[in-house]
Amino acid sequence: MAGAKAVPNLVRRVGHHGAPAVQEGETGAWLVPLFISKADAYARRYENVVCAVSHRWEEPNQPDPEGAQFVALQAYLKEHPKIEYVFYDFSCVAQGSDCGVERTPAQKETFKRQLANVNLLYLGASVLILMDASYLSRFWTQFEAYLSMKTVQFDPRTNAQAIAPAARHEKRWTTKCIHNASAEFEGKHVEHKWWRADQDMAMLILERPDTIVTNAKDKKVQLERLESEFSRITFRPVSKETSSFPRRRASSQEAIGEPASPQERKSRGMWSGISGAAKANSGRNSGQLSVKV
């Protein structure tokens, strides 16, 4: 996806139709694999560099048919010039048969890793909530909103790290209303519902049958992870001097999600498959791990 510095050129390129699917982005060489570590995510080291977009798919095969989401993203990036990378699932996760394409074997492996770890983005990066009137009825969007309003803190009751409501000065999320949603109603309601919600409340709400999800297995897997892993988090803190971010550009061997060596796999933790965009240089690809058109 795109960083703030590329917004004018990117909008000129894709127009009002919004961002392309990941398979289109790959052919245009504007996707940049990055490695994300749990320790850095929990320590919020991606907050000022990476934005994860929380949005509803408006059609089964196209999340943004009118381009309203992309326009809101463009406005957000102009307001947050430090953001270099954006995660937008349609453009960063290889789409399947619902979108009229098939994943390659490599893309299938990457997809599994992305799905298993995507929640780290919403827990550790800046989050743009694209609120429409149906946002608060969907499982994935509500789970993402819940994580975006949390921070990892030490819990003396368990003697471990656990997620807790973020303090006001720790706010990482921004809500932009689109279509029929209003800032005074849906915009405030999402914070009222999720900011102070604890894990038990999240489980209660998200497991209900009126919390809609396309793939029921996704809900089961994510709720199990919420109940087990996020109730007690153990990791080795990473100092600013040894922080693993930003990552260098991945090699072709690493592009499917596996660091090249066991040592790198141990030090890097996992791969989330964030896509980025790098600066254009006279219409050519710059090949740098920054903003690309």
Image (cartoon, rainbow, N blue to C red):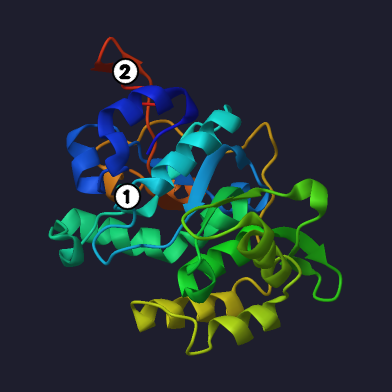
In the image, farthest residue toward the top: 282
20 sits to left or right of 102: right
- The vertical placement of 275 against 175, above or below, is above
Name the residue: 60% across, 83% down.
205
For label 2, the residue is 286
- What x and y, as percent, mark residue 289? 41, 27
For label 1, the residue is 66
Crowdedness of circle 1 by 10 Å Cα count: few (<14), some, many (20+)?
Answer: few
Quadrant of the image containing the C terminus = top left
What amino acid type is highlighted by mark number 2?
Ser
Residue 250 quadrant: top left
Q: Is residue 155 visible?
A: yes
- What x and y, as percent, mark residue 258? 33, 50
- The vertical placement of 258 against 186, above or below, is above
Name the residue: 69% across, 35% down.
240
Q: Nearer the viewer, residue 265 or 219?
A: 219
239 sits to left or right of 48: right
In the image, farthest residue toward the bottom: 209
Q: Is residue 245 visible?
A: no
Residue 162 quadrant: bottom right
Number of marks drawn: 2
Going from N to C along the chain, the mark reached first, 1 or 2, is 1
- What x and y, as percent, mark residue 200? 69, 83
Disc 1 vs disc 2: Cβ atoms closer than 8 Å? Answer: no
Look at the numbered disc 2 and give the secondary structure of its residue: loop
Q: Nearer the viewer, residue 86 or 63?
A: 63
Disc number placed over residue 247 in the picture, else none: none
Look at the numbered disc 1 and give the secondary structure of its residue: loop
77 sits to left or right of 191: left
